[in-house]
Image (cartoon, helix red, strand yellow):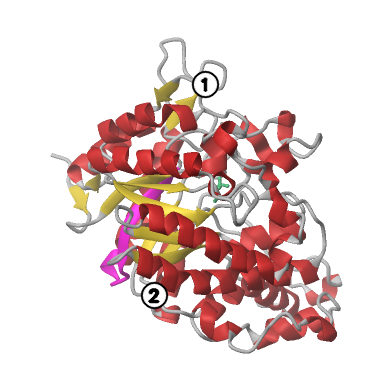
Amino acid sequence: MTKILKFPENFLWAAATSAYQIEGGWNADGKGESIWDRFSHTPGKVTNGDTGDVVIDHYHRYREDVALMREMGLQAYRFSIAWPRILPQGRRKIEQAGIDFYSRLVDELLAANIIPYATLFHWDLPQALQDEGGWTVRSTAEAFVEYTDVITRALGDRVKNWMTHNEMSVVVFNGYVSGEHAPGIKNDYVSAIRTGHHLLLSHGWAIPIIRQNSPGCEVGPVINANYSPLGSNSKADRMAFNFGDGIWIRWFLDALYGRGYPADLVEQLQVRGLVPVDQWDFIQPGDMDVMSTTTDFVGLNYYFRYISRNNDLPEEENEPQTVHPLPKDNINWTEMGWEVYPDGLRHVLARLYFEYQVPKIYITENGASYSDAPGPDGRIRDDRRIRFLNEHFRAALQAIQMGVPVAGYFVWSLFDNFEWGHGNSQRFGLIWSDYETLQRIWKDSAFWYQNVIRQNGIEEE
Ligand code: IFM
């Protein structure tokens, strides 16, 4: 008989989505425009001109979707709330229809015995706030607090698990450095760092309000931390590592854990002229204390390994090293071009616990993009996704066995959905989305996950 590697008894098996990626109904019932509506409606920004206008129309089909979750056996579901549904202009005027939608969704989840985990900000900032400077200005952080108050008052009696921001680093760098995401600004480190600051600040400001409106709740941020080992011990690679790891991971975790912004990074940003010395006045006294307000957990989104190399420096400063040990094939690389590296999840979990003493960690996202489609018999044989998840679940279990307090696993994603700049071309779902008919079809991985949940474990190979 096959041996089952069991997870701890109260381990939470779950899946995640976000509002803009599945809801559709982009202007339904008084919803305001978000920066992602604006971005996706701008020609040339998203692959194939895809938008979030309809996607899988979860806004109108949430009942059917919760029924699918129940059938799969999900114990919890992570979704996000679209700020412009609640406050179409970002502040002041409240749209009751938007609140009612989430209220119905939460009731439906609870009736299905599925614990709701709500993310307050998963990138769809009201466009009206962007027009005033977006996250680069402090007033947006204040507006976030207003929005948090409104929505947690409405749902706080039933939602007891809150996540503030999803992946602040991605908002910062994809929005203001690479420009691949809304608002699509490139190489503007001043705006990027200001954005990060106001996200962190608003996270800290929101926590006491959430706790007040949702007695007994737990709250935390969701960070994305991939595994980034050194390419070699050369000076150039160490510099690349310190900057890459520093700006993507330490910048946020150090601030959240009361260590302030990493001094070496601040110096680098200044020396390189990316954020000149006279441009740091957005940091006000007390800000760093606010952002390090204690949280109950940290959500970790983990996807891949990238090896820190610095190819910009003269060759003599680089020791020749193999950057990636594997040729790019379709097993060890997902269709996003990300390396499959389960052991990295164990490393990152251990780092969160041993370096930052995070008291409780949820894996709030992990999954893979593979485009396996229905065969002639209608079945979707996504073996690579099963392998991917199986190996990552095993890595999480190893971390738990090392003493890391991992409390649950939210597979990204429940459905194929709008993958930001890639539009509908990348498919992360356990459930296939037919964007023409809006049919939802279980992939083999969905049946497999249903079984993992049932037995609270994976099969030992
Ligand atoms: O789809 C995204 C999600 O919105 C945030 N984390 C990464 C996922 C895959 O790219």
Residue located 29% across and 66% down the image? 215
Residue 224 versus residue 281 in the image, above or below:
above
Q: Is residue 410 magenta?
A: yes
User: How would you rate the neighbour count of disc 2 (Cα within 10 Å): few for under 14, some for 14-19, many for 20 or more?
Assistant: many
Q: Is residue 128 magenta?
A: no
Q: Nearer the viewer, residue 407 or 302?
A: 407
Disc 1, SS: loop
Give x and y (percent) for residue 232: 65, 72
- Mark 2 within 8 Å of ligand 1, using the beta carbon: no
Residue 405 versus residue 128 in the image, above or below:
below
Give x and y (percent) for residue 142: 60, 68
Q: Which mark is residue 434?
A: 1
Give x and y (percent) for residue 455: 18, 43
Provide the residue designation for mark 2: 358
Q: Could you tell whether 339 is left or right of 361 in the image?
A: right
Q: Quadrant of the C terminus?
A: top left
Q: Quadrant of the N terminus?
A: top left
Report the amino acid beneath label 1: Asp
Residue 249 at least partly seen: no
Q: CA distance from mark 1 to mark 2?
A: 40 Å
Q: Residue furthest left?
A: 1
Residue 65 versus residue 356 in the image, above or below:
above
Magenta-drawn segment: 400-412
Q: Residue 388: name its quadrant.
A: top left
Give x and y (percent) for residue 430: 42, 34
